[in-house]
Image (spheres, rainbow, N blue to C red):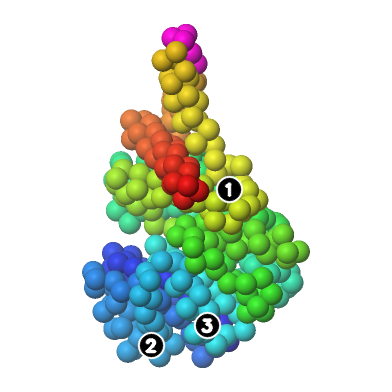
Amino acid sequence: MLSVICPIYNEVKYIDVCIQSVLLQDYPKEQLEVLFVDGMSRDGTRERVLEYAREYPFIKLIDNPKKIVPVAMNIGIRASKGDVVMRLDAHASYPTNYFGVLVKKLYELNADNVGAACRTDVLNKTPKTLAIREVLSNRFGVGNSTFRLGVDKVMDVETVPFGCWRRKVFEKYGCYDERLIRNQDIELNKRIIHGGGRICIVPETYCTYLARETFKGLARNNFSNGKWNVLTVYYTRQLKSLSVRHFIPLVFLLSLLLPLFAALFYLPFAFLSFLSLLSYLLVLFCISMSINLRSKISISYLLLSFVVLHLSYGYGSLVGIYKCIGYGK
């Protein structure tokens, strides 16, 4: 049996898209259970899932009073019955072959975790949301993350979005670290790799992640990502819990702020901040121009999307450092 676990919390805007893609899977429904683990949603998400559960017996709703994703995953793992466990995200949709391909490749490759590329899209397509989508799919926006850029062959990687595991993986390497509100997948996958396990990304399928559609939502999400990059290292006491690319926005922000602080004592240091900012904006403008020529997306929205993404991410990492200092006192 395949057990699919999907943490949810106030996802009424996206839950129908997610569940409809689950219902269209070509995987045998008699060999499937789908567990939606809900953080006590208050926007109608629970009611929508229960409507589907009444019609489709393989869909179940489970409560997660602690609300956060790693707790939801551990609740789902303990409640599940399958030999194979798969994670979904409610902010995404999945092509009809998604379940079948990942389960098949899990055994063919003798891997501990298998995933696929994650494409980015938006529900409502406007000049602003299309710019956000493009930035979240661009190497300058998301770094060299393999699963965001896509693959054309099977590759061994550090992490994959969501994932598909044999149950014995959790018995061998442990379940999700419930201290980590973000980065729990990355930390688990790093643990698997450093324990001698294998994680693969495959080209035969993909998932489509539905991104936030406002600059406020983009900033809030990436602020949290940046903050939890630092807190993940703090809680796990291991730099190897994450990769270098996760800290590049922090380095950029520090290249602006530290010279300005030093300029309080010696004014010429301010030139270093100006140089860093000018270099960043020149690169940003060239990349935005290139995207505009290819896809006709608004340059102003592209520039703003990149700046919001990078600065909110970097600022989140700074806040994470501040919190770590506070925890250490």
Horizontal side of residue 31 vs 65, given as left or right? right
**Horizontal arrangement in the rendering, residue 182 relative to residue 193 (left or right):** left
The image shows residue 76 at horizontal and vertical percentages of: 48, 79
Question: Which residue lies at the image location 39% right of the left edge and 62% below the top edge?
Answer: 91
Q: Residue at x 62, y 84 (%)?
A: 83
Which residue is denoted by mark 2 in the rendering? Answer: 56
| Residue that lies at the very extreme toward the front in this rendered image | 329
Picture coordinates of residue 47, whole percent (x, y): 26, 79
Residue at figure coordinates x 58%, y 48% from the top left: 145
Mark 1 near mark 2, Cβ–Cβ under 8 Å? no
- Density class for disc 1 (Cα within 10 Å; few <14, some 14-19, many ≥20) is some
Three-letter amino acid code of the residue under disc 2: Tyr
Mark 3 residue type: Arg
Q: Is residue 211 shown in magenta?
A: no
- Kindly state the secondary structure of the residue where label 1 is placed: loop
Of the residues under marks 2 and 3, which one precedes in the sequence?
2
> At x 66% / y 62%, what residue is drawn?
191
3D distance between C-alphas at marks 3 and 1? 30 Å
